[in-house]
DNA sequence: AGCACGCCGACT
DNA sequence: GTCGGCGTGCTC
C-alpha cells in the first residue's frame, strides 16, 4: 500500500527509444539501491522531484498501450493499487523473478583489501552466488564495496530470469520408515495428530499432502514436522499434463459449415452486422437452455477467423466445461489457447506467450482470460454472463464484463453476452436499448423443455417418509435405472450432516474461528468448518450442558450418496463436490466418465448445474431447493432462478423427453413456480419491479465497504468513524439520491477470527464519489490507530456479506 | 517490503 | 564510551 505508486526515473539516452508505456524495467530502489522490477506507466519530460535515479535496464514490453490504460482504469474503478491491477493481467508478473547472479571476473591485474578478497573468494566458491546470499554472509555494509568491484570488472553480474517452482508437480507424502519404526515413533514422542497422519500413510501409498491434511484434519505444519524428523518424506510428483495438450489436431475433413435454424440465423445475422460495424457494440443473446447459443457464436467466430481476427471467449468454470474446449480444439485446432486457474504456471505462461506472439486467434478461459494480451481484438463473448464467477472477490475486485466493455471499446470490437438466464441488469439494459438484444426461444432440433414437478416434502413427512428422497423422485429414478437413462441429483451442501446441535439445551456446534456452524464429514470422520478449514473430532457430549444430547442433522451430498446407495444398491453412483477432488479423480474425469455412461447417477453441488450437455440424462432432481431461497441478498432470487433453470435444463437435451423434480418445503414459493415454467421473462418482469421499488441495480450502484480485524470493538469503531466521515463529505458536495446505511455486522460476523462490519451505500457511481472514497481509504490506512484493521471497498459486489 | 536512522538501556 | 534491540519513516 505504501510504495504502490508512481516513481519518476530518468530514461538514459541509450534506452530512449526502447522504453514505452508497458515496458518492464529494472530500477535502483530505496537507500540500498537494490534492483526492483517496475513497469513504465507514462513517459514524460518533467518531474516534481529533483534528484532522479536512472533506469538501469529494460527487460521487455509486457503490456500494450491499451493495457496500460486498462491498468489505470482498474486502479480507478476497483480501488486497487498498480500492483494488483498488473498482477491480474500478467501470468509472469509474479512467476518470474529477477535475480542477479555474481561470478568472478578478471582479478589478476588489481589489488584488493582483506574483505574484498574474502568476498571474491566466496563468490568463486559458490556457483550461483546472489546478492542476498552475499548480504547474508557479510552483512549490509559491503554494499558500498560491491558496486566498485562490479564497475572495474572484478565481479561479473549475470541477470537471469528464474522461473519459480513449477506447479505441474504435486506434493505427495509417503512413509519413510517401516511400520514398526513408525509405531515406535508414535509411542516415544508422537502425538495424536502425528498418529492420524501416519495411520493414513501406513497403507503404503503416497498421498497428496493437501488430501492428507483433509483426511487427518491437520495443517501442513504437522506434515512438515514429521518430514523434519525423517518419519515421512514429501516428494514432488509430476501430475499429468494439461488434458488439452494432445488435442491440437484439427479435424479438417469434418470441418462442417454450421447450419442454423431460422430463429438462430436471425440472431446470427443481426450479430454479424454489429460485428462488421466499425464501432464498439454490446449485444445480449438470450436463448433458453438447449437453444444452441454455442452454435450461433461459433458461426460468428468462424467469420472472425476467416479474416484472421481475434476472439476472447469467457466461460464461468473451464474445468467443468471440458466439452466446450473439446469442441473448439476440434474445430479450430492450434488456433486456440486455453487459460484458467487450474493450469500450472508453466502452462499458463506458455499459452500467454503464444497469444502475445500472435500464434493463436481464440482464447478460451475463465475470468482472467479477459486480459489476453492480443494486440487487436475483434470479438469478445461472455457465456453465461450472469455467473458470479466473473466478478473477482479479491483485489482487484473487477467484473470481467466491465473489463470486456473497456477492451471492446478500445478495439471497436463487439461484446456478446450470452445466457439462458441473463442478469437482471443486463436484460434491463438490453430492453432499454443500451445493449442490442437477440432472442432464441425454441430448443434446437427435436429436444423439448423438460417437464418440471414441484414436490412438497411436508406431504412426504406426513405420509411417514423420513428420507430425503421423496416417493415421487424415488420412482422417477427407478424408471430411469430401468430404461438405462442417466440421472443428475443436485444438493447445495457438501459434507454428511450439515447441522450438529444439542437436543437438551439447543447448543449448536460452531467453528471457534468463524460464526459458522460445523459440518460433519464421513470420509474423514471429522466436523469441519467450510470457511477456515478448522476441523475437530465429533463429540457426543454437549460442551455447553454436559448432557449426551448431541445430534447430527441435515443432509449434505455425502449422506445423500449413502441414502441413494441404500435405495438403489445396484446403481453405479458418483459424487462430485469440492471434497471429491483429488489427483486421481479430477472433476473433468468424473464428468467424462459420467458422459461416457460409466455411472447411472451423479450427485453433486453447484458443479453439476453448469453447461453439461449429455444426451442420455433424462432426469434431474433438486433434492432441496429451500436452502437457496432465503439468502438475505438482493440477488438471491436471481441466483435461485438461474440455478434451477440451469440444472433443470440439463435434462432432455436429445430426443428423449426430460423430467425434473424439485423437492421443497415451500411449494408455494413464487421463484419455484416461475422456475417450473422456465419462464425467464415472467421472472424478469417481477424481479425488475422489486429492484425498482427497493432501489437496487440496475437502478443504482451499490458500494460495500467492509472492515475486518481481530478486535471486535475497534472494527466497529472504524466502521462508524468512516461512516460519519462519509456522511459529512456527502453533505459537503451536496450529493442527493444517496442512501447510506449505518454500519452493521456482516452476515457471517466472524471468519478466521476476524470480525467484520460493513457499510452499504446505494448511489449513482461517478468519479467525484470514487475520489471521496479513495481519499477516505488512503487516510484510513495512514491512521495509526487503524493499522490492524483492513478496509475493503467493493463496487457492485456479487454477494453482500 | 526492506533498509537506515535514532533513541534508549545494558555492558565494558 | 559503545553495542544492539526496536520503533519509525522513507523509498523518485
Image (cartoon, coloured by chain):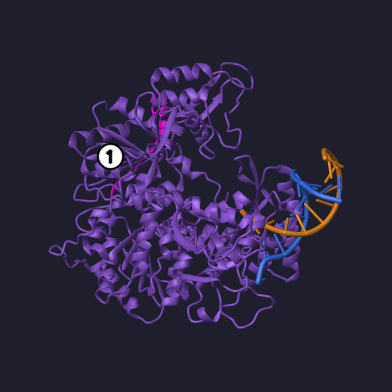
Chain colours: A purple, B orange, C blue
Q: Could you tell me which chain the residue with mark 1 belongs to? A: A
Query: Looking at the image, which residue is at 56% across and 16% down?
Result: A548
Instruction: Identify the residue under disc 1.
Output: A487
Q: Is residue A394 visible?
A: no
* Disc 1 residue crowd, few under 14, some 14–19, many 20+, Cα 10 Å: many
Which x, y percent locates residue A444?
A: 23, 59
The one of A772 and A169 positioned closer to us in this rendering: A169
Is residue A261 positioned above or below A141 on the image? Answer: below
Query: Looking at the image, which residue is at 16% across and 61% down?
Result: A251
Query: Looking at the image, which residue is at 59% across and 81% down?
Result: A44
The one of A204 and A306 positioned closer to us in this rendering: A204
* Picture quadrant of residue A710: top right
Magenta stretch bounds = A450-469
Which x, y percent locates residue A474?
A: 30, 32
Q: Residue A511 lies in magenta, yes or no?
A: no
Q: Residue A458 lies in magenta, yes or no?
A: yes
Question: Is residue A567 left or right of A728 when viewed as pictured?
Answer: left
The one of A595 and A423 positioned closer to us in this rendering: A595
The one of A795 and A654 positioned closer to us in this rendering: A795
Amino acid at each position: 500500500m505504501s510504495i504502490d505508486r508512481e516513481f519518476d526515473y530518468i530514461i538514459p539516452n541509450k534506452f530512449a527509444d526502447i522504453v514505452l508505456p508497458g515496458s518492464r524495467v529494472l530500477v535502483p530502489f530505496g537507500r540500498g539501491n537494490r534492483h526492483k522490477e517496475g513497469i513504465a506507466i507514462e513517459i514524460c519530460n518533467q518531474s516534481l522531484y529533483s534528484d532522479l535515479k536512472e533506469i538501469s535496464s529494460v527487460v521487455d514490453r509486457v503490456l500494450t498501450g491499451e493495457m496500460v490504460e486498462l491498468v489505470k482504469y482498474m486502479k480507478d474503478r476497483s480501488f486497487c493499487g498498480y500492483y494488483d491491477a498488473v498482477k491480474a493481467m500478467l501470468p509472469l508478473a509474479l512467476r518470474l523473478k529477477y535475480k542477479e547472479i555474481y561470478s568472478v571476473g578478471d582479478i589478476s591485474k588489481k589489488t584488493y583489501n582483506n574483505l574484498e578478497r574474502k568476498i571474491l573468494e566466496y563468490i568463486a566458491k559458490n556457483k550461483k552466488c546472489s546478492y542476498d546470499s552475499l548480504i547474508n554472509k557479510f552483512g549490509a555494509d559491503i554494499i558500498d564495496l560491491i558496486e566498485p568491484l562490479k564497475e572495474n570488472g572484478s565481479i561479473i553480474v549475470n541477470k537471469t530470469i528464474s522461473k519459480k517452482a513449477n506447479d505441474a508437480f504435486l506434493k505427495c507424502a509417503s512413509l519413510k520408515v517401516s511400520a514398526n519404526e513408525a509405531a515406535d515413533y508414535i509411542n516415544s514422542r508422537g502425538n495424536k495428530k502425528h498418529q492420524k497422519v501416519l495411520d493414513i500413510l501406513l497403507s503404503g501409498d503416497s498421498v497428496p499432502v493437501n488430501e492428507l491434511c483433509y483426511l487427518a484434519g491437520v495443517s501442513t505444519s504437522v506434515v512438515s514436522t514429521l518430514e523434519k524428523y525423517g518419519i515421512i518424506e514429501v516428494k514432488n510428483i509430476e501430475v499429468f499434463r494439461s488434458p488439452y495438450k494432445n488435442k491440437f489436431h484439427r479435424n479438417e475433413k469434418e470441418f462442417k459449415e454450421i447450419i442454423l435454424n431460422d430463429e438462430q440465423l436471425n440472431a446470427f445475422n443481426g450479430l454479424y452486422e454489429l460485428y462488421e460495424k466499425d464501432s464498439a457494440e454490446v449485444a445480449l443473446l438470450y436463448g433458453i437452455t438447449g437453444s444452441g447459443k454455442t452454435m450461433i457464436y461459433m458461426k460468428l467466430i468462424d467469420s472472425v477467423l476467416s479474416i484472421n481476427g481475434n476472439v476472447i471467449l469467457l466461460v464461468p468454470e473451464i474445468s467443468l466445461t471440458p466439452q466446450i474446449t473439446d469442441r473448439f480444439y476440434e474445430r479450430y485446432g492450434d488456433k486456440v489457447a486455453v487459460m484458467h486457474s487450474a493450469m500450472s504456471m508453466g502452462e499458463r505462461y506458455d499459452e500467454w506467450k503464444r497469444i502475445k506472439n500472435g500464434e493463436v486467434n481464440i482464447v478460451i478461459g475463465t475470468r482472467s482470460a479477459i486480459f489476453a494480451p492480443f494486440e487487436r481484438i475483434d470479438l469478445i463473448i461472455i457465456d453465461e454472463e450472469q455467473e458470479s464467477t466473473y466478478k473477482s472477490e479479491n483485489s482487484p475486485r473487477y467484473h470481467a464484463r466491465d473489463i470486456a466493455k473497456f477492451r471492446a471499446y478500445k478495439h471497436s470490437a463487439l461484446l456478446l453476452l450470452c445466457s439462458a438466464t441473463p442478469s437482471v441488469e443486463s436484460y434491463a439494459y438490453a430492453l432499454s436499448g443500451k445493449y442490442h438484444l437477440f432472442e432464441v426461444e425454441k430448443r434446437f432440433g427435436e429436444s423439448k423443455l423438460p417437464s418440471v414437478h414441484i414436490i412438497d416434502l411436508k406431504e412426504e413427512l406426513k405420509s411417514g417418509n423420513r428420507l430425503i428422497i421423496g416417493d415421487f423422485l424415488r420412482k422417477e429414478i427407478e424408471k430411469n435405472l430401468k430404461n438405462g437413462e442417466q440421472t443428475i441429483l443436485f444438493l447445495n451442501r457438501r459434507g454428511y450432516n450439515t447441522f450438529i446441535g444439542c437436543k437438551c439445551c439447543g447448543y449448536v456446534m460452531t467453528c471457534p474461528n468463524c460464526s459458522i456452524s460445523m459440518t460433519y464429514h464421513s470420509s474423514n470422520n471429522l466436523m469441519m468448518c467450510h470457511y477456515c478449514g478448522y476441523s475437530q473430532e465429533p463429540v457426543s457430549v454437549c460442551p455447553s450442558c454436559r448432557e449426551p444430547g448431541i445430534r447430527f442433522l441435515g443432509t449434505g451430498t455425502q449422506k445423500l450418496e449413502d441414502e441413494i446407495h441404500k435405495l438403489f444398491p445396484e446403481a453405479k453412483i458418483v459424487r462430485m463436490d469440492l471434497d471429491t477432488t483429488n489427483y486421481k479423480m479430477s472433476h473433468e474425469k468424473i464428468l467424462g466418465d459420467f458422459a461416457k455412461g460409466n455411472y447411472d447417477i451423479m450427485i453433486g453441488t453447484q458443479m453439476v448445474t453448469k453447461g453439461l450437455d449429455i444426451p442420455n440424462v433424462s432426469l434431474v432432481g433438486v433434492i432441496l431447493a429451500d436452502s437457496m431461497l432465503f439468502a438475505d441478498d438482493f440477488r438471491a432470487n436471481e441466483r435461485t432462478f438461474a440455478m434451477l433453470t440451469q440444472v433443470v435444463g440439463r435434462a432432455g437435451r436429445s430426443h428423449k423427453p426430460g423430467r425434473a423434480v424439485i423437492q421443497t418445503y415451500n411449494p408455494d414459493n413464487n421463484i419455484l413456480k416461475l422456475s417450473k415454467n422456465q419462464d425467464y421473462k415472467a421472472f424478469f418482469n417481477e424481479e425488475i419491479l422489486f429492484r425498482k421499488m427497493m432501489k437496487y441495480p440496475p437502478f443504482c450502484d451499490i458500494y460495500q465497504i467492509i472492515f475486518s480485524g481481530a478486535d471486535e470493538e475497534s472494527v466497529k469503531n472504524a466502521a462508524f468513524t468512516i461512516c460519519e466521515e462519509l456522511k459529512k463529505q456527502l453533505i459537503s458536495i451536496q450529493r442527493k439520491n444517496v442512501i447510506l446505511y449505518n454500519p452493521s455486522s456482516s452476515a457471517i460476523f466472524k471468519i478466521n477470527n476476524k470480525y467484520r462490519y460493513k457499510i452499504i451505500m446505494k448511489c449513482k457511481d461517478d468519479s467525484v464519489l470514487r475520489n471521496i472514497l479513495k481519499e477516505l481509504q488512503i487516510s484510513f490506512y495512514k491512521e495509526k490507530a487503524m493499522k490492524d484493521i483492513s478496509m475493503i471497498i467493493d463496487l457492485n459486489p456479487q454477494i453482500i456479506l
